Amino acid sequence: MSGSLNLLIGLAMGLNLLALGSGRLPSLIRTVSLQGVVLGLLPLLMEKEADWRIVLVAVATIVGKGLIIPALLRRAMRTAHIEREIEPIIGFVPSLLLGAAGAIAAVALGETLPLLPEHAGSLLVPGAMASIFTGFILLIGRVKAISQVCGYLILENGIYLFGLLLIRSMPLLVESGLLLDLTVGVFVIGIIIDRIQRAFDSLDTRKLTALRE
Amino acid sequence: MSIGIWIIAFVLRLVLWLLLAPLLPGIINKVKAWMAGRRGPPVLQLYYDLGRLWQKSVVFSTLASPGFIIGPAVAWVALTSAAMLMPLGPAGFVVSFRGDVLLLIYLLALARFCTAWAAMETGSAFEGMGAAREVSYAVLAEAAIIAAVLCLSIQSGSVSLVTMLSPSAGAGAVLLAAGLFTVLLAENCRVPFDDPNTHLELTMIHEAMVLDHSGPPLAVILHGAAMKLLLFTVLLTEAVLPTAALPPLAAGAALAGGVLTVTIGVGIIESLLARFAFRRVPLLLTTAFLLCLFALLVAWKGGAA
């Protein structure tokens, strides 16, 4: 059980790096949605007996992160006529190396943390920290609003991984509230992207720093 | 083992390497032709080419020093020696000592240095450009090879190729295989890093280096490149497949099958992919390095736990 769990989290960590290295927006969105699906499968593996609430959380996560959010992002891309190329502030190779260094540091840090014995061998905490770090790199290092949204989604995936540690004691309400917030957030960002595109003729968020009358 | 048997084994293995190497580019070309729906050149085409080139005379640039001839020769000898260091599955090894893997890496580097040196000898701008490209990609590819070697070495707790390559790479095998395969494509100048069939000097890498070579030196360079390809496919196969755990006959079949699979894989990749833009190549090589690095981490953690 722990083996397949670690395999899935390892896959998610690999997808982090893929997200850092991808040069086109559609492939970035695909990577993020795939990561959402992989993480959605995790609760099913963690619990031996299938509790209906856990199944519900898993299904909601897979549908939300794997289908609804990517569809919203693709629609925003289509309506705003965004170019597919990603313009990085931190280049692809440096951000890949940063992400890999972050993943290694997360594994090293995870070893030293005083975790419960049942979580000691798993990659949950390192995976969570690596995803949060990757999210930060994408948020800081990319110019376009959509790639920043993808960074935000990876960041949230990391927080979700942390939340899995408490899956038994976390009420369903909190979990579903988080997911709803995320979906609404992406929905609103889709509208904002459209507005940015109309006002500035580009999605470069650097232009938002200059104030005008 | 008495010295007489050793010499016979050595010569047999040398002949095997020398004769089998030109087969691989032929297989790759055949696979590419099949994928494109053509009949393609015969599998033995490179043998004919080598024979034809060997009979031709050499054209010398007036600028070239003897390095123009010495370079390819030394590179070929280095690649052949590197091939002799490789253990061949059930056939074991003929030359092996502690730390021979370091010699292997350095011999590959020496071969590259000599090819680049011979390329610069002609004083042609294209050749200088090709050499610069080849060497700058090699810097990144070498980091990946060193990470892969470290991974194998930590897994087996040894620095000698025979014991390093005999156990399978375990959990990190997939990562290591992907990383080594990418390095194989880069080191042997295959698509997506370089197009061996290109006729435009500006986009060439390896081909640009050998533009002014002719006759026997060109034959030696081509044969050396085929040897290098065979060496990398054998390395990849032995690093991933647990050949030592199988009975000798099955291990030999597994090795041959693995080499054939990798070769066909190269051909399929060349048919499906276009060459990458130059600015994307470092990204791909960094990915290969990271794959090997994570295989190294898996080996390290797996060993500790």
Image (cartoon, rainbow, N blue to C red):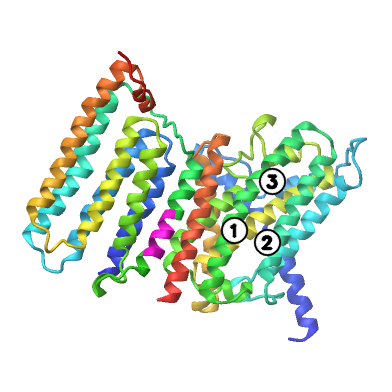
Quadrant of the image occupied by residue B301? bottom left
Give the prevailing secondary structure in the magenta stretch.
helix
User: Are tags 2 and 1 found on a single chain?
Assistant: yes
Q: Is residue A189 left or right of residue B129?
A: left
Q: Residue at x 71, y 67 (%)?
A: B84
On the image, the x and y values in percent for residue A105 come to: 42, 59
Q: Quadrant of the C terminus of chain B?
A: bottom left
| Mark earlier in primary sequence (3, 2) | 2
Q: Where residue A71 sits in the image (x, y, percent)?
A: 22, 34
Q: Nearer the viewer, residue B150 or A156?
A: A156
Q: Are marks 2 and 1 in contact (CB under 8 Å)?
A: yes
**Quick one: A4 or B87, which is closer to the camera?**
A4
Q: Callout 3: residue from which chain?
A: B
Q: Please state the chain letter of the residue tagged with numbered disc 2 in the rendered image.
A: B
At label 3, which amino acid type do we have? Val
Q: Mark 1 to mark 3: distance in Å? A: 15 Å
| Mark 3 in CB contact with mark 2 (< 8 angstroms) | no
Q: What residue sits right under mark 2 in the picture?
A: B105
Q: How far is the residue under mark 3 from the one under mark 2?
A: 15 Å
Q: Magenta region: which residues?
A: A102-109
Q: Which mark is residue B145?
A: 1
Q: Are marks 3 and 2 on the same chain?
A: yes
Q: Which residue is rendered at x = 42% and y = 54% of the image?
A: A102
SS under mark 2: helix
B277 lies above or below B188: above
Give the amino acid at mark 1. Ile
Judged from the image, the secondary structure of the residue bearing numbered disc 1 is: helix
The location of residue B138, given as percent across then percent down, is 65, 49
Residue drawn where x is 53% and y is 75% of the image: B156
